[in-house]
Image (cartoon, grey):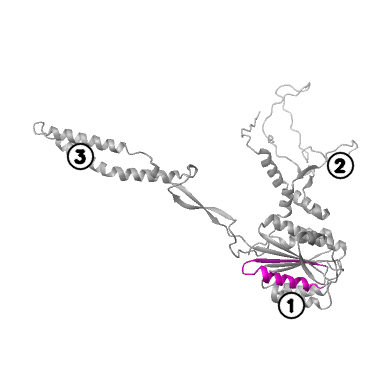
Amino acid sequence: MSYIIDRRLNGKNKSTVNRQRFLRRYRAHIKKAVGEAMNSRSITDMDKGEQIGIPTRDLGEPVFAHGSGGHLERVLAGNREFVTGDCIPRPEQQAGGGGAGSDASDSGEGVDDFVFQISQEEFLDFMFEGLQLPNLIKRKLTGNEAFQVVRAGISNEGTPGRINVIRSLRAANARRIALSSGKKRNIRAMEQQLAAEEEKDPVLRDQRAVETLKRKIADLHGRIERIPFLDDFDLKYNLLLRQPKPRSKAVMFCLMDVSGSMNQVTKDMAKRFFLLLYLFLQRSYEYTEVVFIRHHTSAKEVDEEEFFYSRETGGTIVSSALKLMRRTMAERYPASEWNIYGAQASDGDNWNDDSSTCHKILIDEIMPQVQYFSYVEITPRDHQALWEEYESVRTLFPDHFAMEQIVDAQDIYPVFRQLFSRKVAN
């Protein structure tokens, strides 16, 4: 009989490690559940945890078992048919390994799906996995808050925890060689003189010189032995320095249409899209600033509270938001220092010939300075003039301008992932 013994020690945080292993194993199920949850959540619940259900058929665990070959000895209780030495044919294995079937049962019993709770942090990790701001580059070293510790050679001073053992022993060996090499040469020379003197005839031998040489040799050997194996001077320490860490300065302009043509359902979908974007920026980019702009016939920069909860409305002039974005860029966010991004949500309805004005502002003044601009049109209707003008902008800036359409709430999360998915470098 085979025995399998697990002699691994139970380390600290074992349950945490097991949970992370479990999340990695069922990543596909969890990502699918997160995507479905995003389609049904309200604005206030988008960043909370979630209950994940996994079908029992996908919860198979690896087991150790004997192979199909070999001989097994078993004790069968209540046996009246076989005696010792009889060979019993091995039963054929059935498909499914004898597990619970999927057919209907009249017993009224079964096994429910395995359900577990993921935390808010884990939910956001899965929600924003594989996303990034496109074309992000390091514009300028900002401030002195971000540092990274780097090795900067060897120092003669430091803490005991940073001792470089190899360098210290190498320095100690070099010091001992330097301090003893002259003495060793003198010893060799004196030993040669002593040997020559002792080879002389005892009558001619200078016994006083012999004793003097032996005394000097012993004195030199004593001096060499008194040289310490390791001295404070030999200790070398790894030198660590805190260097400023370059970080990207980025700003995201969120432009939301709140005109009268945007009904409450459309506005709610726009807010959900921008809330996803805001959570993503907070989660993944600590030093990214966000500028909120609401517009109808006029545009206004607002704070987070007013952007998501104000009920102000009016007519529709989309160019007012682009003009305010252009002016804010010029005053506070020069393109030479900042990575500039824009995200716009509208139902596509615009006032008269204002769409051509939007096209001109984007082509001449905004797109040459931004890293990426995304436009989301929230409407089930056919596209209007604004979409057509923006299509020509996308033709001129294919790598820096993106457009998507949202018809209902089910499209918000897939569109968001499509706009900000990590691009594979060519």
Nearer mark to the viewer, of 3 and 2 = 3
Total label count? Answer: 3
Q: Amino acid at mark 3?
A: Met
Task: Tell me: residue 164, above or below residue 285.
Answer: above
- Residue 40 is labelled as none
Task: Find residue 232 and report its image quarter.
Answer: top left
Q: Position of residue 68 (x, y in %)?
A: 69, 36
**From the viewer's perspective, is 194 left or right of 340?**
left
Name the residue beneath numbered marker 1.
360
Foreground mark, 3 or 1, reads 1
Dot 3 or dot 1, earlier in sequence: 3
Mark 3 vs 2, N-terminal side:
2
- At horizontal 46% and vertical 44% (from top left) the residue drawn is 163
The disc placed on residue 190 is: 3
Dot 3: within a 10 Å radius of its alpha carbon, few (fewer than 14), some, or many (20 or more) residues? some
Kindly identify the amino acid type of the residue bearing the numbered disc 2. Answer: Asp
Image: magenta residue range? 317-346
